[in-house]
Image (cartoon, rainbow, N blue to C red):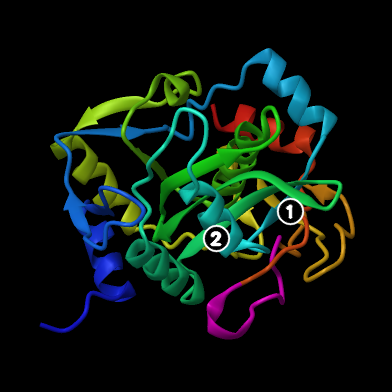
Amino acid sequence: MPPFDAQDLLDCYARGVFPMADAREDPGVFLVDPERRGVIPLNAFHVSRRLARTVRAEPFVVRLNTSFHEVVLACAAAGPGRTQTWINRPIERLYLQLHGLGHAHSVECWQDGELVGGLYGVSLGGAFFGESMFSRRRDASKVALVHLVGHLIARGFRLLDTQFLTDHLASFGAREIDRADYRRRLAKALGIKADFYGAGGVGSGGVVTGADAAVGAGEAAGAVTTAGTAGIAAGAREAGGRTAVAATGMGGAFVLQLIAQAS
């Protein structure tokens, strides 16, 4: 039997299943197709007042895809209350392959030159499959999630899959749906030609959004406008389909505005 590769994994996501492992050092990988699925409706994302204040204050530099592997490793690491992880080494390798193909992305929070929180997931059509997140500073993973949602709205995505429902995700508006409902939503999302790297996107009410952003090692070059067409990753495609954006170019207040418009 040929080895299971990144394209096989994409096919699994398109069918509504995803991989897991029992432990970091366990070499086995199994596929999961839960009867109940966690999703965050992009038009019903909830940001608490306290978190909104933090997002507006911008304590972190939020970047896309500049340290994807480091984010995966941080998510796979043991920590307080988590002695084991489902991200084993075969799964780690598969997501690195997906990243090289332009289908796996990280949203990163940086502070004083240090990666202090973030998340990663997989994009396919108009669906984004959130995989894991980590935080080394208060609210870092939460801020990354808020920026992810704003980015997905701006890029025209329709589905944010959280796999399972937790109390933490429920506080953001996540809900649990049955397998049949999930597959209907997934089929519709896969028919959308959303582009995680697209030059501008359509938000709620047909608002076109974009960002003048520095790409590579520099900081954000300009402010976001509601009529911009430069796009967060315009002209920034690297070999293998990856894009590294030194800063999203989307300020905290603007991200919150996008989320409010979509509601």
Q: What element carries label 1?
A: loop
Q: Main secondary structure of the magenta part?
A: loop
1, 210: nearer the viewer: 1
* Residue 50, placed above or below residue 11: above
Look at 56% across and 44% down and name the residue there: 153
Q: Residue 248 carries which label?
A: 1
Q: First in sequence: mark 2 or mark 1? A: 2
Is 49 situated left or right of 95 in this image? right
> Where does the N terminus fall, quadrant-wise?
bottom left
- The residue that appears at 78% across and 71% down in the rendered structure is 216
Marks 2 and 1 close (CB-CB < 8 Å)? no
Residue type at mark 1?
Answer: Thr
What is the total number of numbered labels drawn onto the structure image? 2
Q: Distance between the residues labelled 2 and 1?
A: 12 Å
Q: Does the magenta stretch include residue 237?
A: yes
> Front-most of 253 and 78?
78
Instruction: Point out the stretch of residues depicted in magenta.
Output: 232-242
Q: What element carries label 2?
A: loop
Image coords of residue 125 (percent x, y): 39, 61
The residue closer to the viewer here, 72 or 244, is 72
> Residue 54 location in percent, x, y?
76, 25
Image quarter for residue 14? bottom left
Q: Residues within 10 Å of mark 2 (few under 14, many from 20)?
A: many
Height in image: 128 above or below 81? below
Q: Residue at x 71, y 70 (%)?
A: 234
Query: How would you rate the neighbour count of disc 1 (Cα within 10 Å): few for under 14, some for 14-19, many for 20 or more?
Result: many
The residue under label 2 is 196
Looking at this rendering, what residue extends furthest in the top direction? Answer: 49
Question: In this picture, is 7 found above or below 176?
Answer: below
